Amino acid sequence: MPLPADRTPVIIGVGEVVDRPADPALALEPLALMEAAIRAADADAGARTGPGFLARIDSLDIINLVSWRYDKVASRLAERLGITPARSAYGVVGGETPTTKIHEAALRIMNGNSIVAVVTGGEATNAVAKARAAGINLPWTPPAAKPENPIVPSDHVTALAVKMGVMQPVHIYPLYENAATAAWGLTPAEALAESGTTWARFAAVAAQNPNSWSKTAYGAAEITTPTPDNRMIAYPYTKRMVANPAVNQAAAVLLTSLAVARAAGVPDDRIVYVHGGAAAAENYDYMARDQYRHSVAQDAVLAAVMRLAPAGFDRHELYSCFPIVPKMARRTLGLAADAALTVTGGLSFFGAPLNTYMTHATCAMVRSLRDRPAEAALLYGQGGYVTKHHGLVVGSVPPEPSSLMTPVDVQAEAEAMREPVPAMDPDYEGAATLETFTVVYDRDGAPAYGGVAGRTADGARVFGRVPADDADTLALLLAADVSPVGTAGRVSVGSDGLQRWEV
């Protein structure tokens, strides 16, 4: 028996803004971008009776901002919109948070705790960078001395990771890329070719998306081959293989109940139903994870959403900050190598407005389902360093009541799949086996240093640095024809107290 119409959560409006003025001083600040996106979502809902939904918003969620740090973010945005929502919240950092907040908004509607909800996010990183380079003071709302929910590095990486120089996302995702390459029985060259082909498909989608930052349909070789304008960042990723946050973009998703939507005259062919979803996370300290071949949190989340759609998904949006994320997800979902993995275009090409890409992805999925209805589609978001995972199932037909009532938290399922976590031994010296690695490049395209995770004979984990002058070890790590994972090495402790790895 379906849910009653007044408890059936639906997405009725989506809005996006792309702002590219020639003069950065004329760029819209994030508050203005989000305001415009919400107003666009209200107009997109297409209410045929009444004044629209804007004044009826009782729940406002704002995705965490990075490019311009305000205080009182929710109240500032509500004031610009001229609304007084009973509930408003400003989120924490995480690329999965849009799917999380949309899911939570749907659950509040189902439970009778909300009537009209909106989730929004926006960034103006491009304008901020250009203004800084030009010495321009932007005429925006002054940034706060103590902004809400700031990024605290120690919440995400340890002091050891910082000392090792392996603390940025672009340093850490290669640990998974290189470990998975070996686990899948691929050579590094084969894995790179897969990434290039996958990313070229993403670029082709972005080229057709009117809200994309980049409209260039790069070929696989243009993406994976290092050039002066596509330098190596961290092996095996070039600039075009990583997320591009230098954008000015905003998006908003408007939700209500089916009963309210129909009473307002929203056409049925513009309504998208929220079916349910699931979430789980890895240890925030990437050095304290069980292994790097896959993510048990991702596996558990994808297994849960597949149970919500036993007939499969007609289309997918798989988070794509780095190639390894959709590559792992594709395999877990059992998708073919040539499967379409995005309706948006990906964070490298559509653009990566930091935490809020999946808000845009939801907009793109809603438009896709309006154009070509389907029973079920998947929105999979991920945040941190392969840390937080949230899958959300949407579709053109109403969900079964059991779908939305399925437990959102599948952490217990993830823990049941986890291997024993090895103890770190930062003082160890001696022989060890290479578990995975990363090589960080300087801006001139030369290897700056490497970072190697290894295992001792008794199973403890070590993490050694490889200096730029260790040509033999770097040659082993960067070989295209065979993965170095599983090879023997030696660990020593330097005068700086850090372990060093060498062949």
Image (cartoon, rainbow, N blue to C red):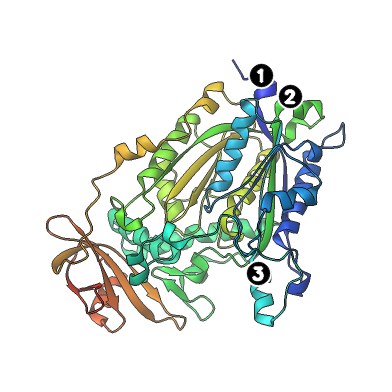
**2 or 1: tag closer to the N-terminus:** 1
Quick check: 471 left or right of 62? left
**Of 144 and 328, the residue lying toward us:** 144
**3 or 2: tag closer to the N-terminus:** 3
Q: x, y percentage for residue 412?
A: 36, 35
**Against 11, is 167 above or below?**
below
Q: Label 1 belongs to which residue?
A: 4
How many numbered markers are drawn?
3
**Of 62 and 85, the residue lying toward us:** 85
User: Which three-letter amino acid code belongs to the residue tagged 2?
Assistant: Ala
**Of 134 and 181, the residue lying toward us:** 134
Picture quadrant of residue 471:
bottom left
Label 3 close to label 2 by CB (< 8 Å): no
Q: Which mark is residue 126?
A: 3
**Of 162 and 363, the residue lying toward us:** 162
Q: Element type at marker 1?
A: loop
Q: Which mark is residue 259?
A: 2
Disc 2 and disc 1: Cα gap in Å? 8 Å
